[in-house]
Amino acid sequence: MIIFLLGVLLLGVVNADVRVFFNKTEIEVHMDNTVFIPFTIENLSSDVRNVNITAVSSNLNVVQVNVSNFDPFLISNGIYKGIVNVSAIFLGNAEVYLSVFIERKWVKSDVINVIIIRRVRIIDHVFTGSIALLVSILYINFGCAIDWDVCTKTIKRPIGPLIGCVCQFVLMPLISYTLGLLLFPDSPEMQLGIFFTGISPSGGASNIWSMLLGGNLNLSVTMTTLCTIAAFGLMPMWIFTLGKHIFERGNLTMPYDKVATFAIGLIIPLALGYIIQKKLPRLSRFMVRTMKPFSVILIVFIIIFAIVTNVYLFKLFSWKIILAGMGLPWLGFLIGIAIAFICRQPNQDIRAIAIETGIQNTGVAIFLLRFSLKQPAADLTTVIPVSCAIMTPMPLAVLYIIKLVLDRRKSNIINSREKLQNHQAATASTPLPLED
């Protein structure tokens, strides 16, 4: 390559008569595919024999190119038509051009922009459908387990939900905006990725973790529902204020239909669970008993399946991506705890508010990115919400394991005390033997 560039600089004379050009200015190629791009050389002499054609890619990590040897017998009326082999290595885009050496002179072609995108696979649809089904079943369980009288009282005196909404839709957007500027000062796409994650409503996983970690499930579900509804107005507000500084495009459109789908997706299974609780108490009790193990299975399934379906994104992981994935949710947990503690909320409510603040609906963030950006930037920037989705459960899982150990130890202590009390009671009731 160095010798090639030196040759260009030394010879440096461009043959103005010969033209080299592609038939297109831009082309999209699916990742891991190879395509053939035609090119044309015009105004060639019929006796030309010594022609060297070199294909050049601006980013070999994304696109690799090569061109077949020049065949002078393919020249017709001074025109030569050839093909460049383009191999799509990874998501991104690269500029491809040809350098043609003809009779001791160099001719450079125009540039074609090659965009590498990802093909939508069957496994992507299977993942989306299976998650939707399992989460719906879980929310039916929630509907069976919720104390609806407590929910009504919570809505009438919404101190907890108000604290959660302030944390979710005021503090989290500001944190995500700041993290984006600090970690990705020269990458507005990555800034947009973490910002869209920060302005998304709390996800359904917050209800699962609230239940597993002994938080107030009634408050958690109420907050999730209210935050999802509030997202209709607050997400566009942030997109057109702080988001405008990151992504200067005034034609961003809020995907109201997608947010509405999430809201309805919460309400319908909850309502079904309510009906089961009132009409089928035996089935309701069974579903409540299976709720915790089912929740654990669902979390493990989501993590494993998400990693399998998005394994290609791990090539993009860097320390900054990992730090962003940890920083946003973990700071959310800490801020939620601090605000709820300052507001003197009960212990169970503090847990629910902290979890609700830290867990973002990364599915909404990914949709917003894919809706707002062109490919492949849309797929590339989803590495941020994917990183958040992977890093979010880590401290929660550690706390859950600690809680299990402490609960088991507490249970053992209680059992030991009961056995000791029973033994003492039995000993006290046994009459002593009479002496001779």
Image (tube, rainbow, N blue to C red):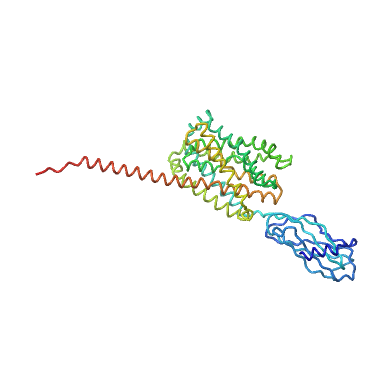
247 lies left or right of 286? right
Residue that lies at the very extreme toward the left in this rendered image:
436
Query: Which residue is found at the position 78% from the left and 56% from the top?
Result: 112
Return the residue nearer the eye: 205 or 423. Answer: 423
Residue that lies at the very extreme toward the top in this rendered image:
156
Query: Which residue is found at the position 62% from the left and 37% from the top?
Result: 231
Of the 4 image quadrants, the one containing the N terminus is: bottom right
105 lies left or right of 174? right
Of the 4 image quadrants, the one containing the C terminus is: top left
Reply above or below: 64 against 253. below
Q: Position of residue 94 (x, y in %)?
A: 74, 56
Q: Position of residue 203 (x, y in %)?
A: 57, 42
Q: Position of residue 129 (x, y in %)?
A: 58, 49
Reply above or below: 240 against 384. above
308 lies left or right of 75? left
Q: Position of residue 4 (x, y in %)?
A: 79, 65
